[in-house]
Image (tube, rainbow, N blue to C red):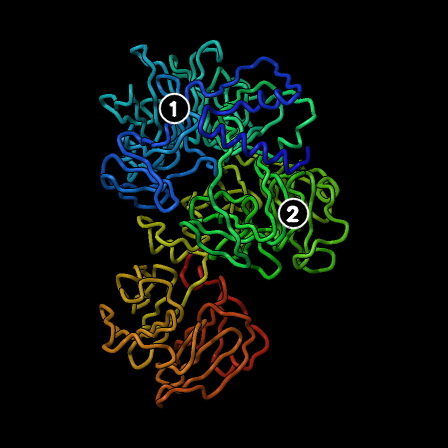
Amino acid sequence: MNTMLIHCLFLGLALALSHSAPPNLDMMMADMGHDHSHDGHDHAHDGHDHAHDGHDHASEGHAHVHDGQDHVHGVTGHDHVHDGHVHHHADHEHVAQIDRCEAVEFDAIVPDASGVPLFFKGDFMWRGFQGPSELINGSYKELIEQHAELGKINAALSMIAADSDKHVFFLLNDKVFSYHDQTLEAGNPKAFSEVFPGIPNHVDAAVECPKGECVRDTVIFFKGCEVFHYETQTKMVKSSHWTHMPNCTSALRWQNNYYCFHGNQFTKFHPVTGSVTGTYPKDARDYFMKCPPNLDMMMADMGHDHSHDGHDHAHDGHDHAHDGHDHASQGHAHVHDGQDHVHGVTGHDHVHDGHVHHHADHEHVAQIDRCEAVEFDAIVPDASGVPLFFKGDFMWRGFHGPSELINGSYKELIEQHAELGKINAALSMIAEDSDKHVFFLLNDKVFSYHDQTLEAGNPKAFSEVFPGIPKHVDAAVECPKGECVRDTVIFFKGCEVFHYETQTKKVKSSHWTHMPNCTSALRWQNNYYCFHGNQFTKFHPVTGSVTGTYPKDARDYFMKCPNFGLLSNHTERERCSHVPLDAIASDGLERAVAFRGNYFLREDETHRDGWHASLVSEAFKEVQSDAEAVFSHARLLYIVKDNKVFAYKSGEQYQLVEGYPKTLQEELGMEGPLDATFVCGDYSILHVIKGQQMFDIELSVSPRAVVHEARLPFPKVDGAMCGPNGIRVFVGAEYFEYKTPKLLAYSRMRPQAHKITLEMFGCDH
């Protein structure tokens, strides 16, 4: 039987099973003549699952498919905040569902009073191991009502209370909500310190441990690498550090076993000692939910003896799902049925997070939106200083723009996925040839690239390149001499931190227990950032000390996310964001205005009150967002967007001049897009930058036309402005100063770079 025929048989079987009971893959494989030996541990097939009949009921609302998207009706109308977003769910409003098979990191997991496991993420929850998401407000509406003040669910646990019934406890910030049969108990919420004295609030996860499995009735709390055993009767607290364990973001007691969930993976542990036995982590989608099966891995398994380690399996999680998309076009990304797709560059099979993916030539692969709380696998600047963000098969260049498949730039990494798994970490270093090289760490291998070309002899063994450092690190970042004592690479693995000196190969290990578990790390503008989940913490590279208020949301500072952060501090976010500016100018009243996405910053006229952020749509409603270029002339502020020019009178409020917008061709005699524009003082020459060219346009004549052209020392700029002290040219996170336009046009050497966030906006995060 050839491979294609066997694949077809599996697909046919999947289609048949998709309308019946969840398949037990071990039994399926055994029926094909394979020996599967289990060691007798319990398997949770689908004993407590709520299977929906295809009408998908979400509490009292109804789920359905609309424009290719699953939607669920809210039960009651409410406003709340989650991860910095304001959400309003009106009665019967359609809310796009979350697919938990898409590598969801759960906020909390807890069995309800009847033993059905509940999975929580943001505003959504799932009952059992299969079925669609539903809004939390249908069952625990008080949690949603408190989101604006308290944020997301930190943890949840189920315990026998004083009335001898099982109660479910939700921990949000510094409050505890106790429910009995989905009814909030009187007097709740209570202060966290009142219910669990001696335990710090803002815990990451919690799980109950009854007497017999722990010495006494206990709740185990996780916060970073710290673990707290809280005895419910005596209220005694014992703290310890389980540095061998990953940072748990949720925890679950299931079938008398204990599971730490981290990312989309889990690790089984002993509740008293934290010891881990067996091969972990494992992918939660393989064991705790119903997700499309790994057909290629099943194929590879055929003809082999399968000895399972006896851990709890939710075997309703291996059905075949078909998304109904059949794509034939090629060569570019497009939107189909409400989904963004991108074409693969080369065909390949590989494994990511326990699932085999095949990307054929020109196959359409749904894009990942990094604004949806993505936890990156690695972040690293390339040789030219552009930060690259990696997640699974995808990467992003810079702080905005769509995802692309890694195989277009670093194809060898994808080719090795089947054997090595996902990227663990990445760093950028000056190598022996004095050029900057990018190093990717996958499992026990190191891949060194120069200008996106894999160097000869690579990949190399991790132990050969970084002797003394354990493999499977969580994150890594370079630290040059001057910022560290010597040229160093800092590795993160759980709460352990390893400083590796590149010249001497000496290793110094320490425990930064005050820090969250870094899943990626980045050196940017001589500062050091630990990324964890969708947040980041700035730290000192030698001591690990953290100064300031952290963590912060990465979407506020390291990427351009439309409609995100509606209740965050706009001014701080826009001042401190590392996302390049869209445009900058003086507004004609000696006030500098800087545009980025949906917001603009305006400097106080006296320069004493600093910068203040406002929505572009409120001040310039005709523009709405994403200004392309701006300049001021004759006390008017001009904004360029989409080949149109908008002219505004400057004042307490900006007023659109009658007759505008005009086409760019009509106004300036040229076509867009433009990168930057500026006018110096009362001069009538407009300097327009497109790519590496600067064009001078005389504004005092009509029709307007280019009178001079020059080539700049920058391949591309983000913005430029002219002020009393000369010209500032903005490139990425830096700006460069020139005394006159002539010096800018004819200089071939770049002047000293200045940091935008620090030197212009006065922000050092």
Q: Is mark 1 on a helix, strand or loop?
A: loop
Q: Label 2 belongs to which residue?
A: 413
Query: Is residue 636 found left or right of 12 in the rendered image?
Result: left
Q: Residue 50 carries which label?
A: 1
Question: For residue 127, what is the image quadrant?
Answer: top left
Mark 2 vs 1: CB contact within 8 A: no
Viewer can see residue 170: yes
Closer-to-camera residue (561/177): 561
Q: Residue furthest bottom?
A: 701
Q: Residue at x 43, y 16 (%)?
A: 218
Q: Which of marks 2 and 1 is nearer the N terminus?
A: 1
Question: Which amino acid type corresponds to the residue marked 1 in the rendered image?
Answer: His
Question: For residue 720, what is the image quadrant?
Answer: bottom left
Q: In this view, does 256 lie above or below 539?
A: above
**Residue 170 placed where, x, y %?**
34, 27
Within 10 angstroms of label 1, few (less than 14), some, or many (20 or more) residues? some
Q: Using the numbered discs, state the Cα–Cα distance from disc 2 to disc 1 in whole angstroms.
A: 40 Å
Viewer can see residue 243: no
Q: What element carries label 2?
A: helix
Question: For residue 549, what is the image quadrant?
Answer: top left
**Residue 517 placed where, x, y %?**
52, 37
Image quadrant holding the N terminus, namely top right
Query: Is residue 162 found left or right of 3 in the rendered image?
Result: left
Q: Which of marks 2 and 1 is in front?
A: 1
Total tally of numbered discs in the picture:
2
